[in-house]
Amino acid sequence: MEYEPVIGLEVHVEINSRSKVFCACLNNFHSPPNSNVCPVCLGMPGVLPVLNVAMVDASMAVGLALNCTISRWSKMDRKHYFYPDLAKSYQISQYDLPLCHDGYLDIEVDGASKRVGITRAHMEEDTARNTHTIGGGISGVDFNRCGVPLLEIVTEPDIFSADEAFAYLTALKQILEYLNVSDCNMEEGSLRAEPNISVRPKGSTTLGVKTEVKNVASFSGVRKAIEFEIKRQVKALDSGEAVVQETRGWDADRGITVSQRVKESAHDYRYFPDPDLMPVVVDDAWEERIRQSLPELPQARKRRFREDLDLSEYDAGVVGMTKDLADYFDAAVVAGAPAKQAANWITGEILATLAERKSDITACKMKPEALASMIGLIGDGTISGTIAKELLPDLIESGGDPKAIVEERGLVQISDSAELEELAQAIIRDHPGPAQEFRDGNKKAIGFLVGQAMKATKGKGNPKLINQILTDALSQE
Amino acid sequence: MSAELFRLSAHETTARIRSGDTNAREVTESYLAHIESVEPKVDAYLDVWREPARARAEAIDAAIAAGQNPGPLAGVPVAIKDNLCTREGRTTCASKMLENFESPYDATVVEKLDAAGAVLLGKLNLDEFAMGSTNENSAVKVTRNPWDSDRVPGGSSGGAAACLAANEAAFTLGSDTGGSIRLPASFCGCLGMKPTYGRVSRYGLVAFASSLDQIGPFTKDAEDLALILAAIAGKDPRDATSADLPVPDYSSTMRDGVSGSRIGLPKEYFTDALDGEVGKQVDAALQALKGEGAELVEISLPHTEYAIAVYYIICTAEASSNLARFDGVRYGYRHPDAASVEDLYRLSKSEGFGLEVQRRILLGTYVLSSGYYDAYYLKAQKARGLLRRDFDEAFTRCDVIATPTSPTTAYKFGEKMDDPLQMYLGDIFTTSANLAGIPGLSMPCGLASNGMPVGLQLLGKPFDEAALIRTAYAYEKSGAPTLGPAPLG
Ligand SMILES: [Zn+2]
């Protein structure tokens, strides 16, 4: 039988607010264990939570970016279970009335656009982290993470392939980065994606039994885990077995999912409204304030780059990949750089240089204005592109004004025709072969000769002029 | 210097300290000596902080000598219920679970008492985790009623009521979830107030039922209520449920009198279930208030009969959640023989909590369970809304509601312990105020023929504690007979 998979995604995002969600402790992943703790996040007797408004702001921003409706009235609930990483033995979360609901995210898969429904995005607190690496049969709990603000974003079962899931996660992460609400670091756990997967006979409208996969540490891992689960479930159904509703863990080393069922079905979380917290009431003005504060989002920006600045699909995609990069590009254009040339430099030499240094645009010392100035120097013939390429690593490393550097280092282009004519004669004399090829009609041979001339001038020759002089010289003979 | 300094009210004490008539150290010594003599018969304290109290009193005296103002409660000795967190000593909730627990922080009310210049004498007994009406559920010891040592002081703030009635502190703080201040105040013949929910910060009060709990004072007179409520009330940024409202100057509004004030008498509270002796004293108090110019009007609170059931569903639900954190992992009792995490939870809770606490955790877990939530918790919340509406309605016809605090005077030890349902019925007149979030106080209004105090309960509009204090003050000034000191005081 032919099957089709149906996939939903739950993504947990740690919000990068300065302090935790219900206390004043620092929200910092890199602190030593149990250093960012206080009676509140340790769940000591008598303490009370107070909701961090920065969490509501950030959650609302994500909700609006995902086209959600923002609840005018929502509440915090308690979700109960016993585990050593849960200080109060309940997690403060949102149960039946989430802050954000009924949104969508448009993604692109194989050039086609697709809409993924967002069921809800709700606020909660992260749990502590158990470690079993201390030795001596002792497990430790690091409460630094307990009470870190967490936004859970849940999709509709609208995703039908591992590639779609990958595209959704990529687009979501891009939005979160644009909003600067999270570090989005999957290895550090600030972004956690948990797919749920079921398969059903193709054409069927009812859903099959689903499994939920946890412990996936990368987007490509999510893709692989989904692919594995689809195959596993199809195989089970084909051989007449039932798929069991359960949580499975992703074993990245073996590339398989493993059943993690530990009395999961017995869980009754006994949700009820947290009496320690007031309802979250959002009025029009608050929502509008957040809406106004939203940056131009990735899709809109990419569209503007394509339509207004005439970039290619590829360039617009690369330049708009991160907000920092897009901001850099926009600033270079504002400083006078022609958009296409700025995009070429960024997607080419600049990103390549940064990649070699395992760094990104935020570490680039060359200001966008300097890029514009450099492109200007090429345009007015002051330097050649070759010289510009040579200058670039230094500019990226140390910054500075390209014009001043060019003058200081004597890199101004040679455009003196007499000097270049003399050089042209010498080049033709030293390379009779290519010269003859040109005369015989292979016009491409001129490239080699121009290259030699540029080499001889250490890149300072004006390549256009050299080309002209060489062509003239060979044609006149 | 008077040997009887411990008999003074809080306002008299601080006035005499300020005037130089006495000083904080003398007052503290007077209380410590009195504690020494009566505490063996009363057993109100779980811990007396003798040396810290002396040091604190000397610091207050030094501040006064240096011309500083140590605050409105300068030098006044106070003791607090042991479910309020203090850095000093332990915070045990009278439970084996927390018998060695040292809080890393002070409750907001403790900070406020410090800021007001009070001298903390120690921590007081209670029913374990504030669950009980007699103090018999304390895992530590039995506190006795200073009026009759064969009788209970009431609960759960029994230690706080008995301590005050025995003059072992100038005032005390307790907590009230369903009557836990008002009932023992009534049984022990003192004033006790549960402020409006949100009037006093709950930060640092070990939670029993978060939507019902309020901290409040036990005092010797109405003027002290005014003084102390003003000192502990107000918005606290650490308690999201505390109200951001100005705190009135109760000491001045207190003297406005009750002339023209309408006192509502809910017909559902004055029934045959009421002990005749109690009814008689309450009537006399109402007549005294009428004599002061108050108008008595009959009102109705039609959903009263549901209050006890609603209360025990909501308070146990919240308790089961609040007490879940006591798991033996980070602090508190940890069973030594647990072989697994599940064992650790099961054994630590089974041995750390007493029977009443376990009973309420189980009840609360049940009413929140899937399949039962709608039938119990949700329905109780709806009924709670109706109870609230009863009061809204009633307060359009009156300014203050008066009822007996309890259908009876203090029970004898063991009288109700075998039948939890009978015990729960003792809360019949007090739980509604917690469910509706309104303020209430109990004030002594004479002795029954068994020699035990009777309490008159006054209930007010939300955040109108001023009306309650004004009414209590008017009663005291009406010339109605006062109780005099308790035999063990
Ligand atoms: Zn904290």
Image (cartoon, coloured by chain):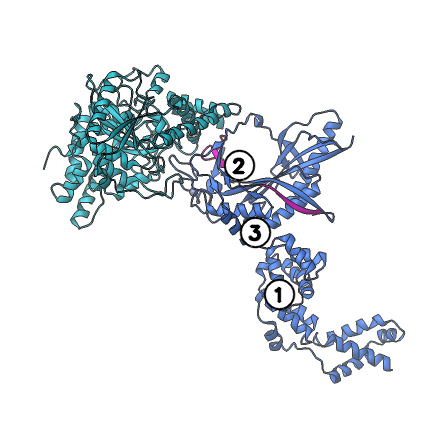
Chain colours: A blue, B cyan
Which residue is disc 3 drawn over? A179
Q: Chain of mark 1?
A: A
Which image quadrant is residue B353 in?
A: top left
Does the magenta run of residues contain A233?
no
Q: Which residues are magenta?
A: A81-108
Mark before the other along the chain sequence, 3 or 1: 3
Marks 3 and 1, Cα distance to the nearest angstrom?
22 Å
Question: Relative to A390, does residue B240 appear above or below in the rendering?
Answer: above
Which residue is disc 1 drawn over? A332
Residue at position x 60%, y 60% in the image: A327
Depth check, front residue: A471 or A320? A320
Instruction: Please provide percent x and percent y for residue A387.
Output: 68, 72
Question: Could you tell me which secondary element the residue under label 2 belongs to?
Answer: loop
Outermost residue, right direction? Answer: A440
Q: Amino acid at mark 1?
A: Ala
Observer-side mark, 2 or 1, equals 2
Instruction: Please provide percent x and percent y for residue B290.
Output: 22, 28
Q: Chain of mark 3?
A: A
Instruction: Please provide percent x and percent y for residue B378.
Output: 48, 27
The residue carrying pointer 1 sits among few (fewer than 14), some (14 to 19) or many (20 or more) residues within 10 Å by Cα, namely many
Marks 3 and 2, Cα distance to the nearest angstrom?
24 Å
Depth check, front residue: B225 or A112? B225
